[in-house]
Image (cartoon, rainbow, N blue to C red):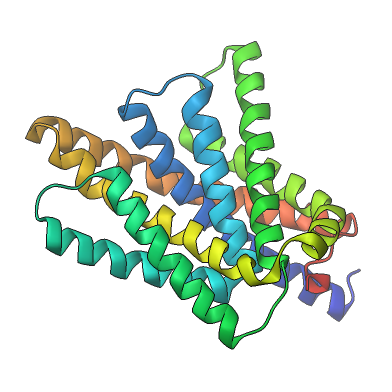
Amino acid sequence: MFTKDQFAAIVMTVFIWGFAGALFGALFAGLYQVLGMLGLSGWQPLIIAAAAAAMTTSAFYSAMPVALVGAMAGVLASIGYLIASGQEVELAMIVSIAGALGVIAGGFYAWIVKGGGRPLAETLTGLIAGLLAGGSLALILSFTGHRVGMFVLAAGVVALVGTFFQISERWLVTRSAGWLPGALSAPMVAGLIASVVGASIWIVGGTTAVMPDGNARGIMEAVVHDIPPGLLGGLLGGAMTGILLELFGFHIEEHP
């Protein structure tokens, strides 16, 4: 029989991990599909999409104010670039402009709100967890030869990323946060998030702008088709992983 506190902790874990998993799954599904459409194959789209989604989700999960500053800067920079450039949307340019504005906004945030290197440490931990999870799944799928749907793929990636992140966070973040420069932590995280936002906007506008209408329509239909199962798979994988980690002693309420 669960106590009131234990029940509340499980409910909070399901909500937070489910929400983070849904965000991760939707972002992973969209990136995975677009990377495949751009010509990447085999392990490449899986590892790149898992790493990018894990880095972004961990930033929102662990350093939400900084991540929101970066996301806002990325949106504003991307919109300004689209207005100025018209129909020509170049990936390197939109990512550079969004990242630069994100760094500036993050620097302003760090000047107002003093903090240490933890936001950057958390984001890098998420990046490492994404690389490990994507690489592990790529090896498993390569050895077994099975093809799985986006629902199962997203659930598996979220479960592995969540496990790697939560297990390594206690020692990796604690050790790295001390020597990472606090003054650069918020600007770098905000710049990374802004760059991801700029790249996401390029995916919607840039990839479709340089292709015939039929191909552009096919890309958008494939992305839209995979996002719902990715979101649901990520939600289920995140919620189940969060409950298991809670039962094994990795308590969400102890997260700083």
Residue at x 69%, y 35% (from the top left corner): 132
Q: How many marks?
A: 0
- Give the answer, above or below, for where 240 lies relative to 84: above
Between 39 and 178, the one nearer to me in the picture: 178
> In the visual, does 231 lie left or right of 72?
right
Q: Is residue 10 left or right of residue 127?
A: right
Residue displayed at 66% across by 56% down? 239
Residue at 20% x, 33% y: name it: 218
Residue 15 seen anywhere in this rendered image of the structure: no
Q: Quadrant of the N terminus?
A: bottom right
192 lies left or right of 78: right
Q: Position of residue 126 (x, y in %)?
A: 66, 51
Q: Is residue 118 above or below residue 215?
A: below
For image coordinates 69% across by 41% down, the residue present is 160
Q: Pinpoint residue 199: horizontal percent, then vertical percent.
A: 35, 49
- Tell me: residue 146, above or below residue 137: above
> Vertical placement of 166 versus 45: above or below?
below
Could you tell me residue 144's position as x and y percent?
A: 64, 13
- Quarter of the view holding residue 79: bottom left
Q: Position of residue 153 (x, y in %)?
A: 55, 34
Res 223 seen here = yes
Which image quadrant: the C terminus? bottom right
